[in-house]
Image (spheres, rainbow, N blue to C red):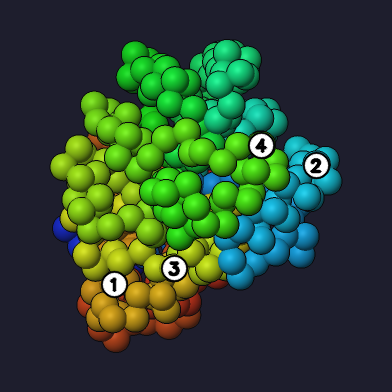
Amino acid sequence: MKIINTDFIYTPNGFVQNKAVAFTGTIQDIDTLETLKKKYPDAKVIQTEANSILYPGFINTHVHLEFSANKTSLQYGSFMPWLDSVIKHRDDLMGACDNNMMQKECEEMMRSGITTFGAISSFGNELEVCEKTPQRVVFFNELIGSNAMYADMLYGDFMERVKASQSCKKSSRITPAVAIHSPYSVHPIILQKAVNVAKQNDLPLSAHFLESQAEREWLESGSGDFEAFFEKYFNTSTPVTNIEEFMHAFDTYPTHFTHCVQATKEELNYLADKGHSIAHCPRSNRYLGCGRLKIEELNLPFSVATDGLSSNDSLSIFDELRASLMLHNDIPIQELSSQLLQTVTADAADILRLNCGKIEAGKLADFAVVTLPEAPKREEELALWTILHTKAVSQVYIQGEQYV
């Protein structure tokens, strides 16, 4: 048993003072330090630095580790030039991204307090790293392939990767999951089969959706920048699906859609009616010129996520939260700060169906300790000061064990 004592605790009911948390691998009790010491006299007491806040470990629901080698190879500013550069440099970037590099990025995420992340895996290359990292990993095996001629082969490869993630040791903290690359890159036949795999095995499900205007034009009319792209690389000028058909494929199973920047209000309402959620990646959307997701108009749950280093400059959740503060400038900053912290804790845990993300009895003891540079003068601004001043957290605990 351990007892951790901080100046503030971030709870589902807001920030509280004069309380401590008793924990093993799970949270056992929340009370005053004196009460907990009497109740658990043999517990180790952890006294944090002054001006510290105890948060549940932060959750990054959507990240690609496989392109971690990218720094200046890929072209930013607009989606289609970026996609062309991905195809041009993909082999070099994949070859340069070894296990040591991906492990380093996992450690960087942990230093920003990320104790859980959703890894979107196209090839399964990062499975070994995800097994070794102490963080919880929802391992999204991604399905991609729009050519019906190769559907069986692509689906077979996908199923092999799903089974490999299912066979991971429980000690690795891996949750197997399914991801659909996008409506323009997955044939409806194998799409439906993959959704059924998620349903039958009760696996989390994710899908990229309406990231760019080019994607929208292609799905609606078979025109725009994607037309030349598909003729050049795939010798076709006809989309394999449309927006409505793609959305309907997920009607019976909650899905975590990524981006949705170009979705209409009607489409977002439809996703909300079906119990879906969104991974919002503000820096990625800005760097690729995709636009802004109007979070102030959303009526469905969303998380803030980093995406991968193919479209970002770091995997720090605090870098992402600061970008969100700048991007959504019409929302009052204190209100937005509180909302953003909830999206990377309780909301993200609910979306990924994990027993963490909240500091309350019975939840997993995943914590991040944030230390402010001075005593906060106003409790109502704790969320804002946390986002603005945190480059790295002071301590990280996963299932009760300290890693930072």
Q: Earlier in the sequence, mark 1 or mark 4?
A: 4
In the depicted structure, whether residue 174 falls above or below residue 2: above
Q: Earlier in the sequence, mark 2 or mark 3?
A: 2
Crowding at dot 2, Cα within 10 Å, few <14 / some 14-19 / many 20+, comes out as few
Q: Position of residue 234 (x, y in %)?
A: 66, 36
Q: CA distance from mark 1 to mark 4?
A: 43 Å
Could you tell me which secondary element the residue under label 2 belongs to? Answer: helix
Earlier-in-chain disc, 3 versus 4: 4
Gap in angstroms between the C-alphas marked 3 and 4? 27 Å
Q: Based on the displayed image, in which of its 4 quarters is residue 273 positioned?
A: top left
Locate residue 85 relative to residue 321 in the image: left or right: right
Left or right: 340 with respect to 380?
A: right
Q: Is residue 62 left or right of residue 355?
A: right
Label pair 2/1, CB-CB below 8 angstroms: no
Residue flagged by tag 2: what amino acid is it?
Answer: Asp
For label 3, the residue is 291
**Mark closer to the chain start, 4 or 2:** 2
Q: Look at mark 4 in the image and give the residue it sits on.
A: 234
Q: Nearer the viewer, mark 4 or mark 2?
A: 4
Residue at numbered disc 1: 336
At label 3, the amino acid type is Gly
Crowding at mark 3 (Cα within 10 Å: few <14, some 14-19, many 20+): some
Q: Which is more N-terminal, label 3 or label 1?
A: 3
Q: CA distance from mark 2 to mark 3?
A: 28 Å
Which tag, 2 or 1, sits closer to the chain's start? 2
Mark 2–mark 1 Cα distance, whole angstroms, equals 40 Å
Residue assigned mark 2:
91
Give the secondary structure at mark 3: loop
In the image, residue 347 sits, relative to residue 286, either above or below, namely above
